[in-house]
Amino acid sequence: MSDQPPPPPGNYPPPPPGGNYPPPPGGGGYPPPPPPGGYPPPPPPGGYPPPPPPGGYPPPPGAGYPPPQSGYPPPPQGGYPGGYPPAGPGFGGPAPYSVGDAFSWAWGKFTANAAALIVPTLVYAIVVVALQALFGILSAAVAPEATSYTADENGFAFSYNVSGPASVAVTILGYIVALVVGGAIQSAYYGGMLDVANGRPVSIGTFFRPRNVANVIIAGVIVGILTSIGFVLCVLPGIAVAIFTMFTVIALLDRNLSPIDAIKTSFDIAKNNFGQVLLTFLVVIVVVAVGALLCGVGLLVAGPLAALIEVYAYRKLSGGQVAELNPQPLPPGPPPQTSPQQ
């Protein structure tokens, strides 16, 4: 007789000694069930993009997506040298512009800086008139036969004709002097207007600081030649050249451009915003004409006002910014801490 117990019912082989049964197959030997929902498992990474997070919306900014463009980037410490940067990616294109806003802004800035704007305008007007009188006297001295004087009930008139080598030399010299002096005046005058647009405090001396005079003179020569050709061909082409080159000096000083690039920039602004630029051009002419009708004294107001309108139009139509009329004061900081007395 054997001491081993009989096999269990069902003719199964006996279990191993000690009860060490092998682990049963998972779930009774069947393959694992599919994931809940009855769908097959997703494809391995790399085949398809990952599904969106719960809710069906893409992840918010900051989770792998580039930050959205939101207007102008903050300026560096101390501001941009030479004014605001040109329009480009991220600047959102030209800012909203209207001639009424341009006039209101220009008038507000004029009244806030009246003395600083009127005195330079008066000085430059005296310089220009003095130069014209000087070269008129020189022309009369070198060619008295070509000089005529008339006086009637309407006043005194002076005229001369260019004839002979001496008067030609005086005329050429006067043209060169007018170019140099005019370029220096324009660079200082519009440079000060850009300081006003940048929100910098200005004084009378601000408008007597010539900037980039050589390029301003070259740009003036090119624009003068183009305008003269336009007026020779017909009046309308000359007016068109004046409109399309309206912002040349301002762009040159604001962005430190070469003369050719400044002319191209002005042309592009006028081409892309022709209706607004044309209206601005007409308003500037009306402002100057009204100032001239007021016995010439009105030009002391009309001159700065027209220049400020041009600067405002240039900045807005090129995607730049101008200083606010009434900037909000900064909130007061915390009171200074005092050390306890010993």
Image (cartoon, rainbow, N blue to C red):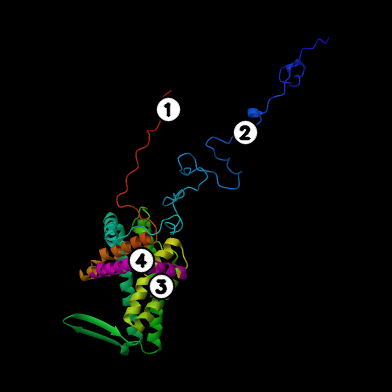
Of label 1 and label 2, which has the lower sequence position? Answer: 2
> Which residue lies at the image location 31% right of the left edge and 58% below the top edge?
116
Look at the numbered discs 1 and 2 and tell me whether their residues touch, using CB distance below 8 Å.
no
Relative to 259, does residue 81 appear above or below in the rendering? above
Task: State the predominant SS element of the stretch in magenta.
Answer: helix
Mark 1 → mark 2, Cα distance in angstroms: 75 Å
On whether residue 272 falls in the magenta region, the answer is yes
The label nearer to you, 1 versus 2, is: 2
Contact between labelled residues 3 and 1, with CB atoms less than 8 Å apart: no
Amino acid identity at mark 1: Ser
Give 302 or 238, whichever is nearer the viewer. Answer: 238
For the residues labelled 2 and 4, the Cα–Cα distance comes to: 69 Å
Badge 3 or badge 4: first in the primary sequence: 3
Q: Which residue is mark 4?
A: 273
Q: Position of residue 167 (x, y in %)?
A: 37, 86
What residue does disc 2 label?
A: 32
Q: Which residue is mark 3?
A: 220
